[in-house]
């Protein structure tokens, strides 16, 4: 294969270009305009939520959600130890502290059975992530949160269109957060969104993302807010992408099925799971590598030589330099094992059947 098979790339059609061009010609290129309201409304409806607040990226979506819920100095927030570092950083931005919890060995999501042991009098909220497109065990998490009167933030940044017991992710918890970064299932280039069914939280987040400025009194700021707004240009791209989301999900699931079929008999590969309660959208088609038989990092180099792009997994939060001296490193074995043996293969919606066959052929030969 002469051409590099990329890990991911945006799928842009004439529709996206026409929507963005329409936004440009309208003159509304910043944070006001037709497409901002449309994107918020359409995406909220798609996920089964009442309200959407678009923001400039997924990390600030988490920060906005935590701030709106009143998380602050001295509080503790439970997070999965295997997750992109933005989950932990957003908590620290508020002045609160993270409490990492180990993950399930098969779904790579937070292990709900280990959450209760980490709850203290300081615990204010739980953040759970639908990792790489596979929904977490939502009902158990919500049950624990209700028992201890905790807020719940659903991080669905990697799982647009995935389903838990027949319902779209993004529908659960007090606030759910999405990212629309360039490698996500649908993209606005950069961007994010907070979804909620609570009108008070919606209004508070809408004010917070715009410097805390009063809606009926221009340049009057009721509290300290942030400049977290999404632009009309980005929202235009998002509207067009949202209209194609089911097309993208179908492609990802089709390619995942082909990967599964072709890789199932390779003894040193552990394939991703799909629980009976879940519809996995395979944002990334990710595998675990048996390190006793082959080095994951060496495998990445060999794939690169064959013009195949791949990525190692996120490092555990507990091992990251800003957190390793602050986290009590106990009962985090699964997250560490997964993080250091995990590998994501090309997962673009532009990936062809021929390219999937080539990737699997190279893996088999190794």
Image (cartoon, rainbow, N blue to C red):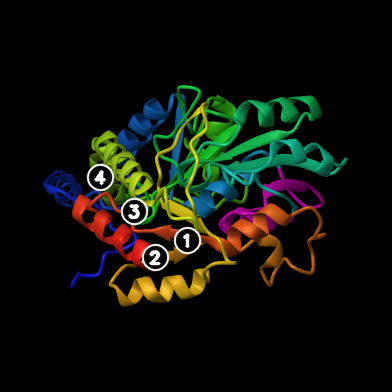
Residue 175 falls left or right of residue 100: left
Q: Earlier in the sequence, mark 4 or mark 2?
A: 4
In front of the other: 242 or 246: 246
Residue found 25% across the figure and 45% down from its top: 236
| Neighbours of disc 2 within 10 Å: few (<14), some (14-19), many (20+) | many
CA gap between label 3 and label 1 equals: 12 Å
Residue 305 higher or lower than 286, as above or below: below
Residue found 47% across the figure and 61% down from its top: 343
Tag 3 residue: 347
Label of residue 236 in the image: 4
x, y percent for residue 141 = 68, 32
Question: In the picture, residue 106 is in which quadrant?
Answer: top right
Residue 317 higher or lower than 177, as above or below: below
x, y percent for residue 81 = 67, 54
Label of residue 343 in the image: 1
Task: Report the quarter where the C terminus lies.
Answer: bottom left
CA gap between label 3 and label 2 equals: 9 Å
**The magenta stretch spans residue 262:** no
Tag 2 residue: 310
Span of residues in magenta: 71-95
């Amino acid at each position: 294969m002469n051409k590099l098979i990329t890990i991911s790339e945006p799928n842009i059609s004439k529709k996206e270009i026409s929507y963005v061009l329409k936004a440009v010609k309208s003159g509304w290129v910043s944070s006001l305009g037709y497409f901002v309201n449309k994107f918020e409304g359409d995406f909220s409806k798609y996920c089964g939520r009442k309200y959407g607040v678009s923001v400039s990226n997924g990390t600030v979506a988490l920060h906005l959600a935590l701030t709106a819920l009143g998380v602050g100095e001295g509080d503790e927030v439970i997070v999965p130890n295997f997750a992109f570092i933005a989950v932990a950083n957003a908590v620290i931005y508020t002045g609160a502290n993270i409490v990492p919890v180990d993950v399930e060995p098969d779904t790579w999501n937070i292990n709900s059975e280990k959450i209760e042991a980490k709850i203290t009098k300081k615990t204010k909220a739980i953040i759970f992530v639908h990792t790489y497109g596979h929904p977490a065990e939502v009902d158990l998490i919500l049950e624990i949160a209700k028992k201890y009167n905790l807020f719940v933030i659903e991080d669905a940044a990697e799982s647009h269109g995935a389903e838990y017991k027949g319902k779209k992710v993004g529908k659960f918890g007090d606030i759910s957060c999405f990212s629309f970064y360039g490698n996500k299932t649908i993209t606005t280039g950069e961007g994010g969104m907070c979804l909620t069914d609570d009108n008070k939280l919606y209004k508070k987040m809408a004010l917070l993302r715009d410097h805390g400025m009063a809606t009926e009194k221009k340049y009057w700021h009721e509290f300290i807010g942030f400049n977290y707004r999404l632009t009309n240009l980005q929202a235009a791209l998002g509207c067009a992408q949202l209209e194609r989301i089911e097309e993208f999900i179908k492609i990802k699931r089709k390619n995942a099925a082909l990967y599964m079929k072709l890789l199932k008999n390779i003894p040193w590969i552990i394939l991703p799971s799909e629980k009976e309660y879940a519809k996995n959208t395979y944002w990334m088609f990710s595998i675990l590598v048996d390190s006793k038989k082959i080095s994951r990092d060496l495998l990445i180099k060999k794939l690169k030589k064959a013009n195949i792009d791949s990525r190692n997994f996120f490092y555990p939060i507990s091992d990251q330099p800003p957190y390793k001296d602050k986290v009590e490193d106990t009962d985090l074995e699964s997250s560490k094992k997964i993080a250091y043996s995990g590998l994501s293969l090309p997962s673009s919606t532009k990936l062809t059947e021929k390219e999937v066959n080539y990737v699997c052929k190279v893996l088999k030969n190794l």
